[in-house]
Amino acid sequence: MSLPASRDKDLPPYETTTSSLRVFIVGAVALIGIAVFFHEARPIALLGLAAMALVTALQRPRQLPSRSRKASARTFSLWPETAMKAVVEAIAEPCIILDRNLMLRYANQQVGAAFGVVSLGDSIALRFRSPELLASIERAVKSAGSGRAQYVERGPAARAWEVEISPVPAARGEDPFFFLMLFHDRTVEHEVERMRSDFVANASHELRTPLASVIGFIETLQGPARDDPVAREKFLGVMHDQARRMSRLIDDLMSLSRIEMKRHIPIETRVDLNTLLRETCEMMAPLAAESGVALEFEPPQGEFLVLGERDQLIQVFSNLIENACKYGDSGERVVLSLSAGRNRDLSYYDVSVRDFGAGIPAEHVPRLTERFYRVDAGRSKARRGTGLGLSIVRNILVRHRAELLIESELGKGSVFTARLPALKDGRSF
């Protein structure tokens, strides 16, 4: 949309300067209002800017000829093309200026980075096809007030936004002609909420299934199988397995809760990973033998010191070893290794657990640490998995400022690596 060119060049220098100062004052005041409304971090600097503009303006006479007032109005009509550009570009988040006809008047560079190319002059409805968002914008424009809406940008990498709509202050008490849309990225919060909802639903399902099974067998034993000793023994065995499954699930849920409660407590104890891994291998040897897997570990020389909580680190390594033994698909052996590395200024120790099974399809790898996520739900339940093991591992490693690296190749197996910051002279480096 093109706007008429200003004819300030036809005015005397006195009137043109005064008109420009008015525009500058309005722009500065609007900048402060936007900053306060959206909690920008530089309100003092903005107040200083407005103060300088105000002091300069007060040095001029207060009364202007009618011709100057008309020129000032014409200059104000160009405001979004001039002063507002600096305001909008100074905002670190995607920001769009609309007019009261819902036409796109200006968009900062962050809009292009987040949403791709937008065409100025087009209706906002052509780019953002969200009934909730469009309805919120229309209400704000109609009432000359503010609004708020949620918007999800669909696609391979979906992003969730909270959108705030606010009128840009107009001159001399007029109704606002321009409206500002500010997009706050809420993708992380949106994903956390999704995972929380999934967790509640999955936890309820995981507990309900074995509980319903137990109740069903009890009712059968009280009725048709009351006097059938063979059926009674069979059903009691199934009930025992289901009760153990619920017990494991509750234990893992409690474990996750304890880990999250201690997440922000600093760790001050020193642990030698070399010693800890030898103890873990001895503890996990019976499970490996039961699974028909040879557990291999060749301890390196020397100490591998980290800041860590001993019991939690044992839980990490035992979970990784247990998964490799259970889901390695008869790979016959699981190899545990400990090595040192350095990445720029960070020295670290890698504890890797490798199996030689069928591997994990690439599309499942990013979600392996989600609660109750299973690549093959049937196989996991058959092997007494709760779907919480890797979530426990990830949460413990987060507390230890560590990370979990996962590599897998179909037909060749998987490697799960816990990378922990190393200690040197008793401190992290």
Image (spheres, rainbow, N blue to C red):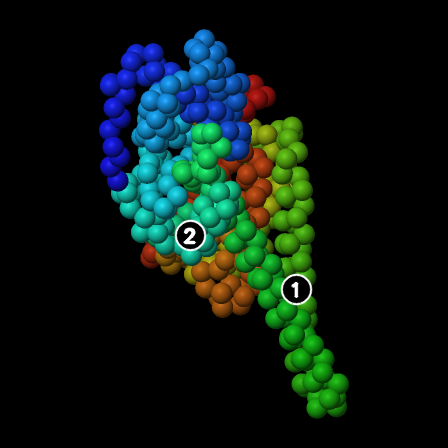
The residue that mark 2 highlights is 134
Name which residue type carries label 1.
Met
Asked if residue 349 can be seen in this view, the reply is: no
* Element on which disc 1 rests: helix
- Who's the residue at 38% across and 16% down the image? 18
Between 157 and 248, the one lying in front of the other is 157
Circle nearer the N terminus (1, 2)? 2
* Element on which disc 2 rests: helix
Between 129 and 152, the one lying in front of the other is 129
Real-space CA distance between mark 1 and mark 2, rounded to the nearest whole angstrom? 48 Å
- Who's the residue at 69% across and 85% down the image? 220
Q: Quadrant of residue 98?
A: top left
Asked if residue 262 can be seen in this view, the reply is: yes
Image position of 245 with respect to 188: above or below:
below
Name which residue type carries label 2.
Leu
Q: Between tags 1 and 2, which lies in front?
A: 2
Left or right of 197 in this view: 269: right
Q: Position of residue 49 (x, y in %)?
A: 46, 16
Q: Position of residue 422 (x, y in %)?
A: 51, 28
Left or right of 3 in this view: 139: right
Between 239 and 89, the one lying in front of the other is 89
